[in-house]
Amino acid sequence: MALSANLGLPRIGLRRELKTALESYWAGRIDQNALQEAARTIRLNQWTLQKEMGIDHIPSNDFSFYDHVLDTACMLGCVPARFNFKGPAVDLDTYFAMARGDEEAPAMEMTKWFDTNYHYIVPEFESGQSFSLASSKVIDEFLEAREHGALTRPVLLGPVSFLMLGKAKHPSVRPLDLLNCVLPLYAAVIEQLEQAGAEWVQIDEPALVLDLDDTATDAFKEAYAYLAQNKARMSICLTTYFGTLGPNLDWALRLPVEAVHLDLVRAPQQLDDALKQVPEATMLSLGVVNGRNIWKADLTAALEQVDRAVAAIGSERIMLAPSCSLLHSPVDLDVEEQLPAGLRERLSFARQKLEELSLITRAARESSDAIASELKTNQELFAKQRNSPEGQNADVQKRLASLSEDMFHRRSPFAERKAARQLNRELPLLPTTTIGSFPQTRQIRKARWDFKKGLLKEAEYRTLMQHEINQVIQFQERVGLDVLVHGEPERNDMVEYFGQLLDGVAFTQNGWVQSYGSRCVKPPIIHADVSRPEPMTVDWTRYAQCQTTRPVKGMLTGPITILQWSFVREDQPRRDTANQLALCIRDEARDLEAAGTRIVQIDEPALREGLPLRGSDWPAYLDWAVNAFRLATSGVSDQTQIHTHMCYCDFNTIIEAIAQLDADVISIEASRSDAELLDAFADYKYPNEIGPGVYDIHSPRVPSVEEVMALLEKMSDVLDIEQLWVNPDCGLKTRQWPEVEASLTNMVVAARRLRECVAKLQ
Ligand code: GLN
Ligand code: ZN
C-alpha cells in the first residue's frame, strides 16, 4: 500500500509566532524558556495536524530556530573559532551569535538556498577543522514528537550536501575531504535515533540535482556505503529536490538506501527512467505536489504519474510526497479573507498541500473513484482556467503577440548614444550618484502605515512625502552629488510597491514565507495578465526634479526582479510573464521621459539569482531574461540614459549577459568582493559605463576619502576612467543619516580629488 510522506513544514507559525518569539528573546523581553515554549507549541501543532491528516511519514527536526544548515553545523560541532566554542554542546546563544554575530565576532555568511529565496548560513571549514557531536536537537525533537504520540521520520541535511554548501576558510581545505570526519557522526546520530525508536530517517541531499564532478559523485557513493554498513535496522529515505537528477539518476538510485525521493514537479521527465532503473529493494518517493508554489495541484496529472509508477513497480514500493519541504510556501490559506474568489479557489498553501497529498494517497490506495467528487471539482477548476477569459487581458495579449525585433534594441548603439547625448556633455568625469533609497526613518514608515490604515488623508500623506523628497534633494545638493534621486520614501519594498500598482498582481494578508532567520517576506502573487493602469512613479520623480536643476534619476524595478521575488502563475512560460512586466516598465520609463526625466534606473538585483541550477539551462534563461530587460529599456530615446543596478552576487559568470543588457550605466556591488569583480573586468572588456560600489552599505562604517580614492584608482587600472561612475554598493534605506552624510561626503571629495589629478595630467 502506498505510503504518504511529508518532507517538512514552514517553521514560522501561522501568525509568525516564531518571529515574535525570536525577536522578543533577542531584545531581552522574554527568557529562553518562553522562547522554547513558543517553538514547542509550533512543533506540536504541526505534528497534530499531520497526524490528523493521516500522513504516514511525518517529519521531525524540520523545525529550526534560524536555519537547518546552521543546525547541521551545530550538530557536527562545526563552529568557527571566533565564537569561542569550548564544547561539549553548542548553546542557544552561541547558535544565535553564529547566525547574527555579536560584539566579539561577525556573523557567518548567508546565501541563497539553491534557487529559492530562503537563505542559509554558510558552514565554514577552517584548516585543521575538527568535528564532534555538539547538539542533540534531532534526538530531542524525535522524542518530543514521540511523547506527543507521533512516530516521526527525522530529517537530516545529508553529509555531502552539507559539505558542498560550506566554504573552506583556508586554501588547503577541500570540503569534501572532510567527509571521513563527518560520516561517523552521522552514523552515531542515526544509531541514537534508532535507539530512540525511529524506523526511518530522511536524509536530504539536494546537491544531487547539481552538475557533479567525479569527486562529488565518489563522495556520495562513499557516504551512503558507509552509512549502510554502520547502521542496524534504520531505513533511509534519500531526498532530492528542485530539479532532475539527470546524469546522476542511475547511480543515485543504486546507492544503498531504502528509498529515493524524486521531485516530479520540477522534473516529471525523470519518472520513467527511474521506474526502469530503480533496484528491486528500493522504494521510490514521488514528489507530486509542488512544495515551491501556492497553486493548487492538478490532481489528474498527479494521479497519472502515480498510476504509472504503481503499474511499473507496485504500490508497496511507493511513497507519495510534496516535491520538496513545504518550507517555501505560506502556512495556511484558511486565514486569507481578502483574496478575490476567482483567485482564492486556485490557491493552496502548505496546509492545503497536505490535504492534496492525502487525496492523492487515498486515490492511489483505493481508486480514483474514492475521491471522485474532489477530482471532478479539481478538473473543472483547471478546465475553467484554460478556457475562461478571467485573468486574460486582450490588450496585453495583443501587445505581447506583436512584439517586434526593434522593440528589444535601443535606437543607436551605445557609443553613438553616448556621443549624441546632451547629458553626457554636462556630467563631469567620474560622476557621483547613489542607488536610490535614503534612510527610511520612523516618521516615514509611520506616515506610510497611517496612510495605508486610512488614518492619513491622501493630501496629507502627499505633503509629508514631498517634504521628505525636498529634504533629500537639498541634502544631495549640499553633499555635492551629480545625479540625484528622490529617495524612495513612498516604497516599503522595491517589488511590493510596483506589484500594488499593477493589475494582475495580488497580495495576501498572511502569506509569509521565511527568507532568513526571523525575517519573512510576503511575495506578491502574479496570477493574471499584468498591466499598468496608470503611471506609478512619475509624480514623485517629477516633483523631485522640480526642486533642483541637477538631473534626477527615475527609479524602477526591473521585470526579472519582480518576477523572481513573486509567486508566478504557471499557466504560461515565465518568459511571457516577464515580457508583460517588461511592457509595464517600458511604458513607465517612457512616461518618465515625457515628464522630463533624463535618467531612468531599472534595478535588476535578482537577475543572477534566477539562474537555473544546471549550467546547461543557463543560456536559455539568460536569453529571455536579458531580452525582457531590453524590452523594458528600449522604448526611450537615445537622449535618455538608462541605468541598472545589481548587488550581492558573483557576476563574473554572467558578465557577458550583463553587457548584453546594454544599459548605459550599471552600478554594481563591489566593495565586499572587489578583487573578484576587478578580475572579471581584467578578463572581459566591459563596453558601457559602470559604477562599482565604493563602499559597503551593510555596515555603519564610514569610508575615508583615501580609501575611496584608492579603490577608484584600482578600478581605473582595469576600466577606462571615462567609463567610471562613483556610487555606494546599494540603496541606503537601512542606514542612519549621520553615517550616510559622512560617507557620501567622503565619496564626493574622493571623486573631486581624482578629477583634479586627471586634469593636471592632461
Ligand atoms: N533602488 C533600490 C534602493 O536603493 C535598490 C535596492 C536593491 O538593490 N536591492 O533601495
Ligand atoms: Zn542593491
Image (spheres, grey):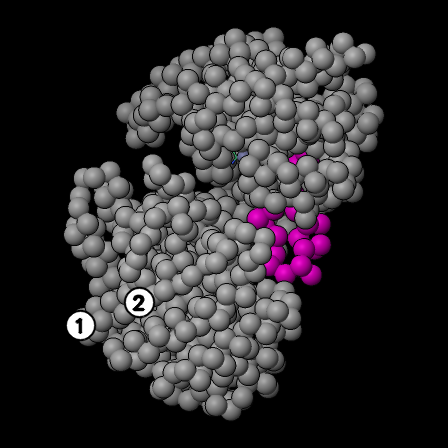
Residue named by callout 2: 138
Instruction: Give, as a three-letter code, the residue at label 1.
Output: Glu
Instruction: Give, as a three-letter code, the residue at label 2.
Output: Val
Q: Point out the tag, 1 or 2, that comes first from the N-terminus.
A: 2
Q: Secondary structure at mark 2?
A: helix
The residue at the point 74 percent across, 44 percent down is 656
197 w.r.t. 30: above or below: below
Determine the CA span between mark 1 and mark 2. 14 Å
Where the N terminus falls, by quadrant?
A: bottom left
Expressed as whole percent of the image width and height from the top left, the position of residue 312 reads 54, 89
Expressed as whole percent of the image width and height from the top left, the position of residue 342 reads 42, 53
As drawn, the label of residue 21 is none
Q: Which residues are magenta?
A: 608-637
Expressed as whole percent of the image width and height from the top left, the position of residue 435 reads 56, 27
Q: Are the residues tagged 1 and 2 within 8 Å (C-beta)? A: no
The residue at the point 34 percent across, 36 percent down is 103
As drawn, the label of residue 147 is 1
Where the C terminus falls, by quadrant?
A: top right
Left or right of 141, for residue 744: right
Callout 2: CB less than 8 Å from ligand 1: no
How busy is the neighbourhood of tag 2: few (under 14 within 10 Å), some, or many (20 plus)?
many
The residue at the point 71 percent across, 50 percent down is 623
Most common SS among magenta residues: helix
Of 654 and 387, nearer the camera is 654
